[in-house]
Image (cartoon, grey):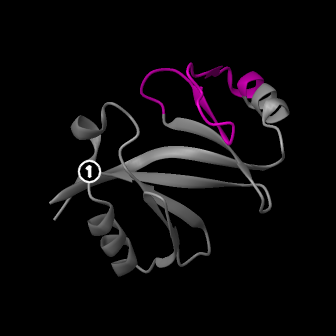
C-alpha cells in the first residue's frame, strides 16, 4: 500500500527572472517567500499552516499552472494514475510528468510537506 495527495500548486513562469512573479504572487496571496531558497529556478511561497504548498517555477514553455501529487511510492502512484487514464509524458530527475485524459499535465513527486504521512490518502 502507498499514499498520495495534492502536494503543491506550481505556477510555471516563462521568464528569466522570478522577481516580478514573486512580487505579484506574494502580494496577491499574502504569502511569504520561504527561507533558504537554493535554486534560482524555483521560489517556494509559504502561506498559512495546512494550506497546499505554492511554488513559482522558471520554465521555457508557455506560462501555466500545474499540480504536484506527492507520494511515498512514485512508481506505484504512476501506475495507479495510468490505470485511471493518465499518460506518462516524461521522467525527470526524481519525478514523473503525466498528462490527464483532459490534457492537463501534472507531476508525481516525493513527499513535500511535513504532514504527509498523517494526512495522505492510502491506496491499495
Q: Position of residue 84 (x, y in %)?
A: 38, 77
Q: Is residue 44 above or below residue 88?
A: above
Front position in the image: 82 or 73: 73
Vertical placement of 95 versus 46: above or below?
below
Quadrant hosting residue 117:
top left
Residue 33 in percent (x, y) is at: 64, 22
Q: From the viewer's perspective, is 120 left or right of 67?
A: left
Start-end of magenta stretch: 26-51
| Label 1 neighbour load within 10 Å: few <14, some 14-19, many 20+ | few
| Residue drawn 62% across the image and 75% down it | 103
Question: Considering the numbered disc 1 on the image, is that residue within a helix, a strand or a loop?
Answer: strand
Specify whether residue 10 is painted magenta.
Answer: no
Relative height, residue 84 to residue 42 (above, below): below
Q: Which residue is mark 1?
A: 121
In the rendered image, residue 78, in percent from the top left (x then y), is placed at 36, 69
Which of the 4 quarters of the picture holds residue 61? bottom right
Magenta highlight on residue 32: yes
Could you tell me which quadrant the N terminus lies in?
Answer: bottom left
Left/right placement of residue 107 relative to residue 71 reads right
> At which x and y percent is residue 21?
80, 35
Residue 27 sits in quarter: top right
Instruction: Please give the name of the residue rendered at 75% of the width and 30% of the height, measured from the top-left corner.
Output: 22
Q: Residue at image x 16%, y 65%?
A: 124
Could you tell whether 27 is left or right of 104 in the image? right
Label count reads 1
Question: Residue sitting at 54 percent across and 62 percent down?
Answer: 106
Amino acid at each position: 500500500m502507498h499514499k498520495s495527495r495534492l502536494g503543491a500548486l506550481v505556477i510555471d513562469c516563462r521568464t528569466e527572472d522570478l522577481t516580478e512573479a514573486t512580487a505579484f504572487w506574494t502580494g496577491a496571496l499574502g504569502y511569504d517567500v520561504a527561507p533558504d531558497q537554493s535554486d534560482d529556478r524555483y521560489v517556494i511561497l509559504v502561506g498559512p499552516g495546512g494550506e497546499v504548498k505554492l511554488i513559482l517555477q522558471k520554465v521555457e514553455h508557455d506560462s501555466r499552472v500545474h499540480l504536484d501529487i506527492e507520494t511515498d511510492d512514485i512508481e506505484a502512484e504512476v501506475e495507479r494514475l495510468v490505470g485511471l487514464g493518465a499518460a506518462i509524458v516524461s521522467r525527470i530527475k526524481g519525478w514523473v510528468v503525466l498528462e490527464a485524459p483532459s490534457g492537463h499535465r501534472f507531476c508525481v513527486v516525493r513527499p513535500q510537506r511535513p504532514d504527509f504521512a498523517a494526512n495522505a490518502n492510502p491506496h491499495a
